Image (spheres, grey):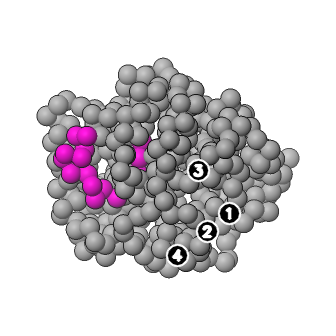
Amino acid sequence: MNERYVPINKGNYSMDTDEREAAFDKFRGEGWEAEYADYRRKWSEYALNQQVSDYPLLVDLELASICNLRCPMCYTISDEFKKSVNTTRMDWDLYCRIIDEIGGKVPAIRLSLRGEATLHKRFADCVRYAKDHGIKEVSTLTHGFKLNRDYFAELVDAGIDWITVSIDGTGETYEKIRKPIKFQALLDKIKDIKKYKDERGLHRPVIKVQGIWPAIRENPDLYYDTFAPHVDLVAFNPLIDYLGNDSDIAYLDNFTCPQQYQRLVIGADGLVMKCSNDEENREVIGNANTETVHQIWHGEKMNAVRALHKEPQGFLKSEVCRRCYLPRETNDETAQICGRQVTVRNYVDRNQEIGR
């Protein structure tokens, strides 16, 4: 039998220096170094060895499946998404019950998925509750609209560990994509965050900025030089088929997904998806309103997902997997960023026009 291909952390790539990447990783683990190293080791090993732990290593908790932007490449604006997904905010009692169960057992949670997490009215309370109950790393992904100095200070006080801000390009390029946010206003917020951290000697939360490659490609040096002085890490994502338009897809041989050994994904309404790439709730494997995390993680439906991926090219039997970027073949594009050579792994036959 041919060796399985299990991609770890595929789809998001650093455009930064080795030294800054090392510092970012160091600050992520500051204060829980041994446990952090164990967590990162297990993130790869469990997936490669197809080992099911007692609890997932990461739980994605979608605090809000709503967003206040209308980005042209985002699936949340599609009719299919609106028909399939209950656009809402997570109930506070449900959130607390999940954290009560997984606190001290799951090392990391990510308070975001499809929508804009900071639209949850108790976002800071969610961070604080998780930290108070033994979650070592609390992270989120945001478009940054709310990240003014006062709101950031509130999140720091709550104990947030890692914030990723999605910023697609600079100047007019950014503003065409991320309406109605103005680029300079967002950049000023990023600078204020840096100043706030420096004034207090804070290493955390680590701040990462990332953007989709077509919005950066024309002048990657400008993108990097704009943000690197003010954040901990600068990264990019190749453009994926956000809108489900691709029909001619080239797949990898012997692909096996790592996610069912790494993370559990709970939507804002409590429905549990089989992975973080099931944007439209096509394969629901549980309901956190009526089941525990432990029951879902070891349940019949999740085990069926794992069994499917053990079959040769078994992922092709799943519509979610067939549409996913993880099993897709890539074409390497080489770029120079501030004198460093960076490899961009674009997906084969993927249109590089944003919104197509």
Which corner quadrant of the image does residue 262 belong to?
top right
How packed mark 1 is, by other alpha carbons closer than 10 Å (few <14, some 14-19, many 20 or more), is some
SS at circle 2: helix
| Nearest to N terminus: mark 1 or mark 4 | 4
Which segment did they paint magenta?
Answer: 139-154
SS at circle 3: loop
Query: Which of the two residues, 334 or 168, is positioned nearer the viewer here?
Result: 168
Q: Are marks 1 and 4 in contact (CB under 8 Å)?
A: no
Depicted 333 relative to depicted 205: above or below: below
Residue to which mark 4 is pinned: 78
Measured in 3D between alpha carbons, the distance from the residue under mark 1 to the one under mark 2, in whole angstroms, is 8 Å
Query: Which of the two residues, 22 or 299, is positioned nearer the viewer here?
Result: 299
Q: Residue at x 67, y 52 (%)?
A: 274
Residue to which mark 1 is pinned: 282
Q: Are marks 1 and 2 in contact (CB under 8 Å)?
A: yes
Q: Are marks 3 and 1 in contact (CB under 8 Å)?
A: no
Residue to which mark 3 is pinned: 270
Q: Are marks 3 and 2 in contact (CB under 8 Å)?
A: no
Measured in 3D between alpha carbons, the distance from the residue under mark 3 to the one under mark 2, in whole angstroms, is 14 Å
Residue 182 % position (x, y): 22, 68
Depicted 248 relative to depicted 195: above or below: below
Residue to which mark 2 is pinned: 84
Which of discs 3 and 4 lies nearer the camera? The answer is 3
Measured in 3D between alpha carbons, the distance from the residue under mark 3 to the one under mark 1, in whole angstroms, is 15 Å
Measured in 3D between alpha carbons, the distance from the residue under mark 4 to the one under mark 2, in whole angstroms, is 10 Å
Q: Is 194 left, or right, of 306 in this rendering? A: left
Identify which amino acid the numbered label 4 is placed on.
Answer: Ser
